[in-house]
Amino acid sequence: MKKQIPNTLTLLNLISGFIAIIMIMNGNLKLSVWFISASLLFDFGDGLAARLLKAYSEIGLQLDSLADMVSFGVAPGLLMYRLIVSAEGLDQYEGLLGYLPVLIPAFSGLRLAKFNIDKAQSDHFSGLPTPATAFFIISLVFAAEYGQSQLIEGLLDSRLVLSFLTVLFASLMITNIPMFSFKFRHFRFKGNELRIVFIGSSVLLIAGAGFAALPLIIILYIIVSVTWAIIS
């Protein structure tokens, strides 16, 4: 029975991602980002439960990637599509730029497939993880809707900026840039120093700037990961 706990959480990840897609198709972007957020929590929870319960299984590995493809590939890609077509500028290229978000599910699928066959990616990732890309995209909506950030609102109004961010984050997923993992194998500080310090810093950012700080967290994650890889 304990092996089904992680799988149940993974299925909840997939279900939340699918509901988010429905919300996006209905134009309810504000609610969709909450369902993608729920998927992120379920994704973190299934891995943590599997490690604590030692409930690893091949079906769990495959199911996790399939769920991630829906929640962190298709849903964010569709969300970015809606943001781009709703933005302003480059009106003559609106139709063409609207197809750019297809890179997000496409490169997410490639990223997940590479992860499944690369046994070296246990304590770190090669390339930006798909949940991180999804988090960045939904963080733009959170910051604009709840953070009252004029900067973010300006970014969301620019079709050029959104197109650039789409290509950038899609490309980061398939690079070999090392990114540290959030996998906690135990709850002691030693061995989790980077994770704990980063999470603490993120909490402080949110406490100081609220939802407006969310996009900065992923930018900080990328910078810290690259810096850590250089000095390690």
Image (cartoon, rainbow, N blue to C red):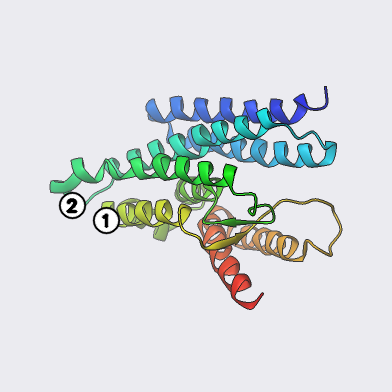
Q: In which quarter of the image is residue 42?
A: top right
Q: Mark 2 points at which residue?
A: 90
In the image, farthest residue toward the top: 1
Q: In x, y percent, where is residue 148?
A: 47, 53
Q: Do the residues labelled 2 and 1 touch (CB within 8 Å)?
A: yes
Task: Give the left or right position of residue 36, taking residue 84 as reference.
Answer: right
> Up-down: is 144 above or below 22?
below
10 Å neighbourhood of mark 2: few (<14), some, or many (≥20)?
few
| Total numbered labels | 2
Q: Three-letter amino acid code at disc 2?
A: Leu
| Mark closest to the chain's N terminus, 2 or 1 | 2
In the image, farthest residue toward the left: 92
Q: Name the residue under label 1.
A: 160
- Residue drawn at point x = 68 percent, y = 58 percent: 203
Q: In which quarter of the image is residue 207?
A: bottom right
> Up-down: is 26 above or below 52?
above
**Residue 79 in view:** yes
Q: Is mark 1 on a helix, strand or loop?
A: helix
Q: Three-letter amino acid code at disc 1?
A: Leu
- Residue drawn at point x = 36 percent, y = 51 percent: 166
Q: In x, y percent, where is residue 21?
A: 45, 29
Task: Give the left or right position of residue 19, taking residue 165 as reference.
Answer: right
Q: In x, y percent, where is residue 26?
A: 39, 25
